[in-house]
Image: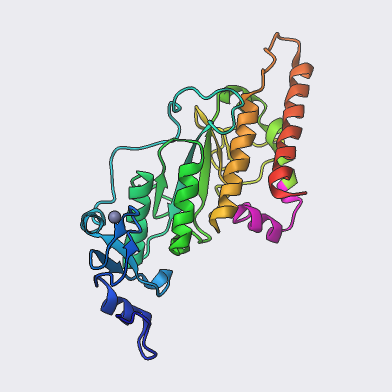
Amino acid sequence: MRNYARLATESIREWADRVNGKPNENKAHCIFCGATLDANTGYALCLPETGTMPRYICRQDRNNLDSLKWYHWNAEHRDADDAPLGTPKKGDIESTTIGLEIEEVHYDSPSFWTFRVLVERCFNVTAEDDGTVDAEFPTDKMSGANKASKMLKKLQKYGFLVFLDNDHVGAHIHVYCVNVPIIRNWYNTLFVPLCEYISKHDNEWIIERFGRTFGSYRNPINEHTDAVSHSNFVNTQHEHTLEFRLPRIHTAEQYLNVVYFWREAVATLNAIEWIANNGNNRAERKAQAVKASETLVNIARKYFGD
Ligand SMILES: [Zn+2]
């Protein structure tokens, strides 16, 4: 039995160099595609940043990894702000379309490239430069959160969240919205109470739940805030989605909780039969928006506590 344990005198990097590419002695699974690898059919992938356990990949993914790591720019822009997948049923939370924009910072390490290819391959996304961070991965539109859940848990299991758990990067959540113009119209009424609910807590509470606090490009709002400012923590600039810009990925469970919260919040707004403007029923319409804002805070309480 080959001993992969680190020698006392060996640095993690030396360990990685020694073990990288070695075949698997025992049955293993490819961390990319999940294929079962009988003994001697996989290759060790040693990633110092993610721990001192060798991971294994299949031959095909080893070839893919080599070719894909040089390919990280795609002119074809993918955007979650696009036609939805099918027609979501109003108020059906589970089928509401979501998309995630996961930002990351470049690291000059083989582990980073493995992380990037893992995300690109499993989420079917291509990293792009958005000008503010080194790259971001806008995912495909997803019906339901199963794919996101599996992916995040996989990244966490292999220690890859280390590349996302950084102060400078966020993970914005887009949820398909059927009535963006009305939401913009009542923006401050709808979202100031949610902002106040979050910001009445101390930083520790906020970071534990959302991964980070308010800051630049995720600003808190007040009654005077411009409804279509891109840097608000709730962004209504897109035609078909409401974007929640506050969160950052700290753990898979913490981030998924925010995804579920935002999905339910937007699905609830989608289900509202907004009163049409007849020119003199502003008070009635305002009351409807106030009621919706209270519902949003109640949904937040359900996910994050009082
Ligand atoms: Zn594989």
Q: Residue at x 74, y 49 (%)?
A: 305
Q: Is residue 77 above or below residue 71?
A: above
* Front-most of residues 112 and 254: 254
Q: Does the magenta portion include 205? A: yes
Q: What is the residue that sits farthest to the top in this orientation? A: 278
- The quarter of the picture where the N terminus appears is bottom left
* Front-most of residues 122 and 295: 122
- When asked about the image quadrant of residue 12, the answer is bottom left
Q: Which residues are magenta?
A: 198-215
The way the protein has been coloured in the rendering is: rainbow
Answer left or right for 197 relative to 236: right
- When asked about the image quadrant of residue 2, the answer is bottom left
Q: x%, y% of residue 224?
A: 69, 35
Q: x%, y% of residue 235?
A: 56, 37
Q: What is the residue that sits farthest to the bottom in this orientation? A: 9
Q: Is residue 212 visible?
A: yes
Ligand 1: quadrant of the figure: bottom left
Q: Residue at x 43, y 29 (%)?
A: 82
Q: Residue at x 37, y 59 (%)?
A: 115
